[in-house]
Amino acid sequence: MISFFSSLLAIFIMIPFFSYILVFVIVKSITRDHKRAVRSSIDITTFFLFICIQFMIAEIWGAGYIWFFYIGILVLAIIFSFFHWKGNVEIQYRKLLKGLWRIQFIVFFVMYFFFLLYGLTTSVLHTVT
């Protein structure tokens, strides 16, 4: 039973969009609210994309370059916080964190496909040559 759950977790980490579909279907069937289902799915998938991208960076370039990923997240958080501060008189931390989490979904989504294509391309080129 433990091996089943660890295999399921590995699938969700390596292919995060399965988690998106699963969470969407479950939340949509329980709440009947499409908007809430999409938001919940994005929130869960962001976590799995975060883990997956770390593994992809470690696999493609080695574990020594993961700190670039963390610095990028920190810079994104600083920029997003600055614009949130400029737009509002008072910083609302809940809105700030929620917005940052959703922005990170978009960034991680793009990074996932970039690293997937890059990893597949380099793997095929190493196999061919």
Image (cartoon, helix red, strand yellow):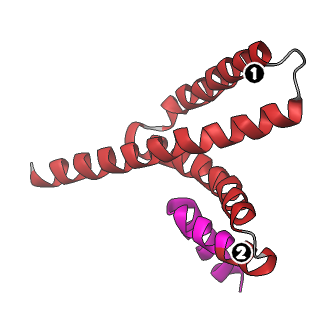
Q: Nearer the viewer, residue 68 or 32?
A: 32
- Helix, strand or loop status at disc 2: helix
Q: Nearer the viewer, residue 27 or 62?
A: 27
**What secondary structure is the magenta-colored segment mainly?**
helix
Q: Which residue is mark 2?
A: 28
Q: With 36 as the anchor, is 9 left or right in this view?
A: left
Task: Choose the circle earlier in sequence order: 1 or 2.
Answer: 2
Q: Residue at x 69, y 67 (%)?
A: 34
Q: Which residues are magenta?
A: 1-24
Q: Answer whether labels 1 and 2 touch (C-beta < 8 Å).
A: no
Quarter of image, res 122: top left
Quarter of image, res 41: bottom right
Q: Indicate the amino acid at tag 2.
A: Lys
Q: Badge 1, how many Cα within 10 Å: few under 14, some, many 20+?
A: some
- Helix, strand or loop status at disc 1: helix
Q: Which residue is mark 1?
A: 84
The x, y position of residue 83, in whole percent, is 70, 18
Q: Nearer the viewer, residue 97 or 86?
A: 86
Q: Residue at x 69, y 25 (%)?
A: 77
**Image quadrant for the N terminus?**
bottom right
Q: With 30 as the anchor, is 62 left or right in this view?
A: left
The x, y position of residue 40, in whole percent, is 73, 60
What is the distance, in whole Å, between disc 1 and disc 2 at their CAs? 31 Å
> How many marks can you see?
2
Q: Residue at x 55, y 31 (%)?
A: 69
Q: Nearer the viewer, residue 105 or 66?
A: 105
Q: Indicate the amino acid at tag 1.
A: His
